[in-house]
Amino acid sequence: MNSFDLFGYHLINHWAGHHPVVDKLMAFFAQYALELYAVLFLLAWFTLPKSESEKRHALVMAGFSGVLALVFNAIIGQFFFRPRPFVTLPKGTFTQLIPHSLDTSFPSDHTSGSFGFAAGSWRKASFWVRWSFTILAILVAFARVYAGVHWPTDVLAGIVIGIVSGKIIWLINPLFKPLTNLGLRLFHYGKYSNETSKKVIKKYAN
């Protein structure tokens, strides 16, 4: 293991196990990123004004950015295996706050997915969505090292993969417009809302 990872890991992880409230918070962020993002997605989708089609499309893009980041991770994991810190380091030299499987540590799935969601929202999502997604992504990346289940370069690679995934998805975003339109139609948002329909009818009636 390289000196950067050893130093960075112990710099962050040595705080674990001393502050119960902080430990619980970090363990929560380290384990439940997907569930937290699901809540934020649903909250944004249903609280945006009905006319906000582009901002809902940004949510769809953010979702697929996170998925693409995880696909990249799965591919990398087929060719590169790195043992997790709790496997490599001697017992008593680290604190592990959450249980974890012995799969590859590099790159961090939680970080890649989180930054994929965040990067996918940066272009056109609402201000509060962009910031909440990004702050949560940063917390998740930090928490994965704090909780003892990742090396620093695992999460750094995850950040890069997530951001690149967001850029790729936006380059091909027209491909996802039909899916966004399907969601708008199902919930009567955007051009499919009753208010919009009434305005169109009124315009042509006059």
Image: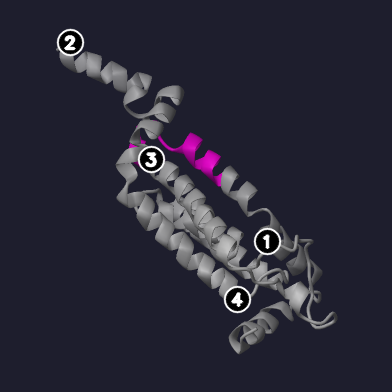
Residue 122 visible in rendering: no
Q: Is 72 left or right of 142, judged from the image as shown?
A: left
Q: Residue at x 61, y 70 (%)?
A: 142
Badge 1 amino acid: Ala
Q: Earlier in the sequence, mark 2 or mark 4?
A: 4
Instruction: Say which residue label 4 marks.
Output: 152
Rendered image quadrant of residue 106: bottom right
The location of residue 120, given as percent across then percent down, is: 42, 53
Instruction: Say which residue label 1 marks.
Output: 30
The correct choice, above or below, for 197 with respect to 87 in the image is above
**Which type of secondary structure does the marked residue at label 1 adopt?**
helix
Disc 1/disc 4 C-alpha distance (Å): 14 Å
Q: Are marks 2 and 3 in contact (CB under 8 Å)?
A: no
**Which type of secondary structure does the marked residue at label 2 adopt?**
helix
Disc 2/disc 4 C-alpha distance (Å): 63 Å
Quadrant that contains the C terminus? top left
Highlighted magenta segment, given as a residue range: 40-56
Question: In the image, which disc is placed on residue 205?
Answer: 2
| Secondary structure that dominates the magenta span | helix
Q: Earlier in the sequence, mark 3 or mark 4?
A: 3
The correct choice, above or below, for 57 with respect to 135 in the image is above
Instruction: Say which residue label 3 marks.
Output: 57
The correct choice, above or below, for 75 with respect to 153 in the image is above
Q: Nearer the viewer, mark 2 or mark 4?
A: 4
Disc 1/disc 3 C-alpha distance (Å): 28 Å
Q: Earlier in the sequence, mark 1 or mark 4?
A: 1
Disc 2/disc 3 C-alpha distance (Å): 30 Å
Q: Earlier in the sequence, mark 1 or mark 2?
A: 1
